[in-house]
Image (cartoon, rainbow, N blue to C red):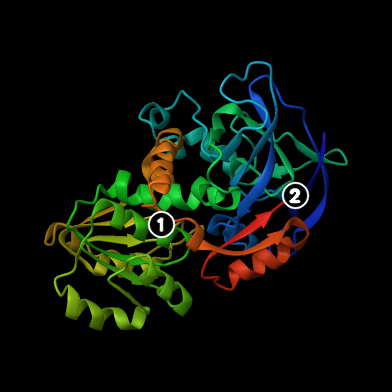
Amino acid sequence: MKTRAAVFHGAGRPLEVCEIELEEPRDDEVVVRMGAVGVCGTDLHSIRGEWQRPTPMVLGHEGAGTVEAIGNSVSSLRPGDRVVLSWAPSCGKCADCARGRPAACVPLHRAIAAGTLVDGRTGMSQNGETVHRGTATGALVERLVVAERVALPLGDDVPLEEAALLGCAALTGVGAVLFAAHLEAGASAVIVGAGGVGQFVLQGTKLAGAKTVVSVDPVAGRREQALELGATAAVAPDELKQTMRRLLPEGVDYGFDAVGNPETTELALRWTRSGGTCVVVGLPAAGARFDLDPGEFNRREKWLTGTMYGSEDPAVALPILLEHVRAERLQLRPLLGPTFGLDDVNDAIEASLAGSAGRVVVQP
């Protein structure tokens, strides 16, 4: 089966839009006609050369589409069903999958590093050469073959361009609050980073009933959006100290780093109060390190933890998020940025690298 795809050949090089070969679906797989794919920070790490990945590779993992065909043993989906992709299939064997956190699955992370699916295949090729899959998915294509278990039912009431955000940014950001931090009603929070994930962290704090939430980002458009989504204050990094002294001089109950740089982690931890919890949500570049003062953890009894993909099985978390969307408690439309066709994928990448206030989406 042939499909058009945006193929990554290495950092500093434009993506090539070309035709590739897909293996026919196996008994437990489905063919999805991709409707929308968000450009995630994970993709940008590869594009900037901050992570080394095998090439050629199809990037993209935050997506939604419509099932076109199913394998012989598929029972939960039918052609015409609309789905959100999960990039974290459970291997069903490791300790992390057994505790319901497939995004921490060791075989999955080995597959991501190798540019394959969990079973070691890619199912993609071009002129006889293997084409690898970004984040065990490879969604920047017109059609994609995936396992039934990672094509999560969406229903018919959420537009695909909005639903794509649920596949990574929303599950990661909202999940960081609800399933990792377990933020209590009335708590306070600082969120460093107001990009796609950070704005969903913000919405997660509002869903959980946070009283005071400060959003931090150098991009003015993102700060404005954070205020529209309910932030108590939205400030540039150099304004945070003054704002915190005015609002929360002892610090916040929860600090969230939605970027993943050493500097942003240090900033979120610095403004987490004694006894508070700081959660690293954003993914760092390979080899990133930061200095820690052990006194922050014994004298001040702070907690520093991390979360991957919302710390919950996407098959469990997605229906919860969809319930919030349908009740208009979780907003998707305001977080959409510019939309591009597959042929303009490099313009989409540039818009995302430039710091678009909304999530950049490609519609293959």
The residues bearing labels 2 and 1 have C-alpha atoms spaced at a distance of: 32 Å
From the image, tell me which residue sits under label 1: 200
Whole-percent x, y for residue 279 in the image: 31, 55
Does residue 266 appear to the left or right of 40 in the view shown?
Answer: left
Identify the image quadrant of the N terminus.
Answer: top right
For residue 239, above or below residue 216: below
Q: Helix, strand or loop at disc 2? A: loop
Q: Helix, strand or loop at disc 1? A: helix
Q: Residues within 10 Å of mark 2 (few under 14, many from 20)?
A: many
- For the question of whether residue 158 can be seen, the reply is yes
Does residue 243 appear to the left or right of 202 in the view shown?
Answer: left
Whole-percent x, y for residue 114 in the image: 63, 41
Q: How many marks?
A: 2
The residue at 77%/30% (across/down) is: 23
From the image, tell me which residue sits under label 2: 56
The residue at 47%/65% (across/down) is: 195
- For the question of whether residue 219 can be seen, the reply is no
Does residue 352 appear to the left or right of 189 in the view shown?
Answer: right
The residue at 31%/83% (across/down) is: 239
Q: Nearer the viewer, residue 282 or 357?
A: 357
Q: Amino acid at mark 1?
A: Phe
Labels 2 and 1: the sequence-earlier one:
2
Whole-percent x, y for residue 261 in the image: 43, 65
Q: Amino acid at mark 2?
A: Pro
For residue 203, above or below residue 107: below
Residue 312 in which image quadrant: top left
Q: Nearer the viewer, residue 11 or 196?
A: 196
The residue at 23%/51% (across/down) is: 183
For residue 358, above or below residue 312: below
